[in-house]
C-alpha cells in the first residue's frame, strides 16, 4: 500500500444541500479521512474562501475540491471557469460530485479540466463507497 502524508492539505466541499454535506462528513469520519474539510455553499462563497477574502486564510490550503454543479448564486461550471482563470487556483484538483447526469454539464466540466465527474450515489453506504474510492485515488496521485 502506498503511504503518503495526506493530511497536510485541506479539502473544500462546494455544496448547497445539507444532507449531502452531512453525508460527506459522515463518510470522511467513517473512512478516517482526517484532512481539514472546508464547506462553501455556492461558488461565490468558495472563491472567497480560496482567495482569503473571508477572514483568516485557510490552513492547510485546499488542494482538492469536491464540487456540486447545481447551486445558487454561482453554479459549479461558473466556479470552475473562474478557478481555471485564476493563476493561484488553476492547479486545484477538482472532482465534480453531482446529481446532474446531463451530457452538457459533463462536457463543460471536462473542458475545464476536472479530475473526475462522479454522480452522487443514492444511499449513505453507496455514498461512503464512492468517497472511499476517491480517497484511494488521492493516495495514488501526486498533487502540486
Image (cartoon, rainbow, N blue to C red):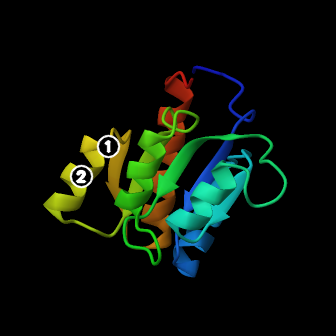
Give the residue displayed 62% in from the left and 72% down from the top: 22
**Residue 117 locus on image (x, y percent):** 32, 50
**Residue 57 locus on image (x, y percent):** 80, 48
Q: Is residue 23 above or below residue 139?
A: below
Labels 1 and 2 touching (C-beta < 8 A): yes
Q: Which residue is disc 2 drawn over?
A: 108
Give the residue displayed 77% in from the left and 48% down from the top: 58
Residue 20 visible in rendering: yes
**Residue 93 locus on image (x, y percent):** 48, 38
Real-space CA distance between mark 1 and mark 2, rounded to the nearest whole angstrom: 6 Å
Q: Which residue is disc 1 drawn over?
A: 112
Residue 106 position by quadrant: bottom left
Residue 64 position by quadrant: top right
**Residue found at the far right of this picture:** 56
In-front residue for pair 5/122: 5
Give the residue displayed 68% in from the left and 46% down from the top: 33
Give the residue displayed 52% in from the left and 78% down from the top: 17
Give the left or right position of residue 103, taking residue 143 as reference.
left
Q: SS of the residue at dot 1?
A: loop
Q: SS of the residue at dot 2?
A: helix
Residue 8 position by quadrant: top right
Amino acid at each position: 500500500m502506498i503511504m503518503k502524508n495526506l493530511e497536510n492539505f485541506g479539502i473544500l466541499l462546494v455544496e448547497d444541500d445539507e444532507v449531502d454535506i452531512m453525508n460527506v462528513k459522515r463518510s470522511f469520519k467513517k473512512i478516517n479521512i482526517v484532512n481539514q474539510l472546508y464547506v462553501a455553499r455556492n461558488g461565490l462563497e468558495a472563491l472567497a474562501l480560496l482567495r482569503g477574502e473571508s477572514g483568516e486564510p485557510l490552513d492547510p490550503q485546499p488542494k482538492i475540491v469536491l464540487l456540486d454543479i447545481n447551486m445558487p448564486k454561482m453554479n459549479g461550471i461558473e466556479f470552475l471557469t473562474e478557478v481555471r482563470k485564476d493563476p493561484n487556483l488553476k492547479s486545484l484538483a477538482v472532482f465534480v460530485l453531482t446529481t446532474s447526469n446531463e451530457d452538457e454539464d459533463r462536457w463543460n466540466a471536462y473542458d475545464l479540466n476536472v479530475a473526475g465527474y462522479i454522480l452522487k450515489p443514492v444511499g449513505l453506504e453507496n455514498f461512503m463507497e464512492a468517497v472511499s474510492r476517491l480517497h484511494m485515488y488521492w493516495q495514488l496521485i501526486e498533487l502540486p
